[in-house]
Amino acid sequence: MPVSPNQGSTGGGDAVTLTGSHFTGTTAVHYGPRQATSFTVVNDTTTDTITPSGHGAVPVSVTTAGGTGVVGSFYYLPPPSFRIEPPPAGPVGGGNTVILTGIGLYTTSEVRFGTQAAAFTVDSDGRLTVTVPAAASAGPAGVTVTTRGGVAGGVT
C-alpha cells in the first residue's frame, strides 16, 4: 500500500509511511491542500510523514525538483461516539458482556473501563461486543474507546 496506514484522525498527528519511487530530494508532502506536519525521506522509495489535520478523503502528494505526484489517498476519520447497552452495571469481578453502539467503531484498537483494558470484538462500524474487565474497586468507571479517528469517552 503506497500510503500506510491510509486512515487517521481528523486532528492529525498520525505517523504515515509513503512508498513509491523518486522520493530523494522531496521538498514537500501534502495531504489534500495541507502540508504534512513533518516528513523524513528514508530512501528513494520511502518517506515517513506526520499528518496535518483534515477531513474526508484527500490525495497525498509528494513534491520534488522533478514535479508533484499523487502517491495515494488518505481518509480522515471522525472520532467515534457510543453508548452502552444494556444499562451499565455489573459485578466487580467483571466478565459480563455489554454492547457498545454508536458510529465510527470499525477501527477500534482499545476499549477501557477506567484503567482496565477490555476484550472486545468489532461487530460492525456501529457495534462492539465487549467483555467487561474486573474492577479495582466498586463504583463507577469511565469507558473509553480508541479508534484511528480518536478517543471517545464520557460514558460511565
Image (spheres, rainbow, N blue to C red):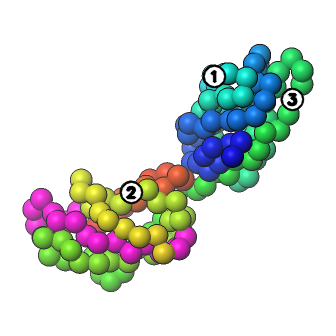
* Residue 42 left/right relative to 102: right
The earlier-in-sequence mark between 2 and 1 is: 1
Residue 48 counted in the magenta span: no
**Alpha-carbon distance for marks 2 and 1?**
30 Å
Mark whose residue sits in front, 3 or 1: 1
Quadrant housing residue 137: bottom left
Can the viewer see residue 62?
yes
User: At numbered mark 1, what does the secondary structure look like: helix, strand or loop?
Assistant: strand
Label 1 environment density (alpha carbons within 10 Å; few <14, some 14–19, many ≥20) = some
> Label for residue 68?
3
The percent coordinates of residue 35 (x first, y second) are: 72, 30
Quadrant housing residue 120: bottom left
Region of the chain picked out in magenta, as a range: 124-142
**Alpha-carbon distance for marks 3 and 2?**
37 Å
The one nearer the camera, 1 or 106, is: 1
Q: Amino acid at mark 3?
A: Thr
User: At numbered mark 2, what does the secondary structure look like: helix, strand or loop?
Assistant: strand
User: At numbered mark 3, what does the secondary structure look like: helix, strand or loop?
Assistant: strand
According to the image, label 1 marks what residue?
42
The earlier-in-sequence mark between 3 and 2 is: 3
Q: Residue at x 72, y 28 (%)?
A: 45
Considering only vertical position in the picture, is 85 above or below 55?
Answer: below
